[in-house]
Amino acid sequence: MSEETEKEEGKEIGKVSTYFGNVGVAAIKLSGKLKIGDKVHIKGHTTDLEVPIESLQIDRKEVESAKKGDHIGIKVPDKVRPNDTVFLEE
């Protein structure tokens, strides 16, 4: 990723692994930190969403924050796809 793209999108912090359409939840494998109150931008070939993090789950348990390597679930307002990139907005 070029430096210019990183400034435009924010810092890459993960990838979508699965989308659960029946509950509107994205499962994400993190490569960075994330906490409640942060805002993420999920971008892919047909995806372009900004999502405020209002709840965060690990193994279906509410948590305040998550770190690199964690598999998390977040509510999303629209469909996302596996391998969509998740950026932390500055």
Image (tube, rainbow, N blue to C red):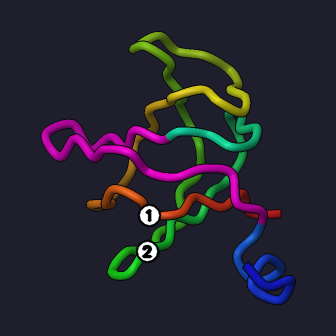
Residue at 33%, 80% (x, y): give it. Answer: 46
N-term-proximal mark, 1 vs 2: 2
Relative to 47, say whether 5 is above or below. below
Give, as a three-letter code, the residue at label 2.
Answer: Gly
Q: Residue furthest bottom?
A: 4
For residue 23: magenta?
yes
Q: Main secondary structure of the magenta part?
A: strand
Q: Position of residue 50 (x, y in %)?
A: 54, 66
The quarter of the picture where the N terminus appears is bottom right
Relative to 13, say whether 37 is above or below. above
Give, as a three-letter code, the residue at label 1.
Answer: Asp
Task: Mark 2: give few (<14), some (14-19) or many (20+) Cα within 10 Å.
Answer: some
Residue at 21%, 36% (x, y): give it. Answer: 23
Distance between the Cα atoms at labels 1 and 2?
A: 5 Å
Residue 86 in the figure: left or right of residue 6:
left
**Considering depth in this image, is 89 or 70 the residue closer to the camera?**
70
Residue at 73%, 29% (x, y): give it. Answer: 67
Quadrant in the rendering for residue 4: bottom right
Residue range highlighted in magenta: 11-28
Query: Mark 1 = which residue?
Result: 84
Query: Mark 2 = which residue?
Result: 44
- Circles 1 and 2: CB distance less than 8 Å? yes
What is the count of numbered marks? Answer: 2
Q: Position of residue 20 (x, y in %)?
A: 22, 41
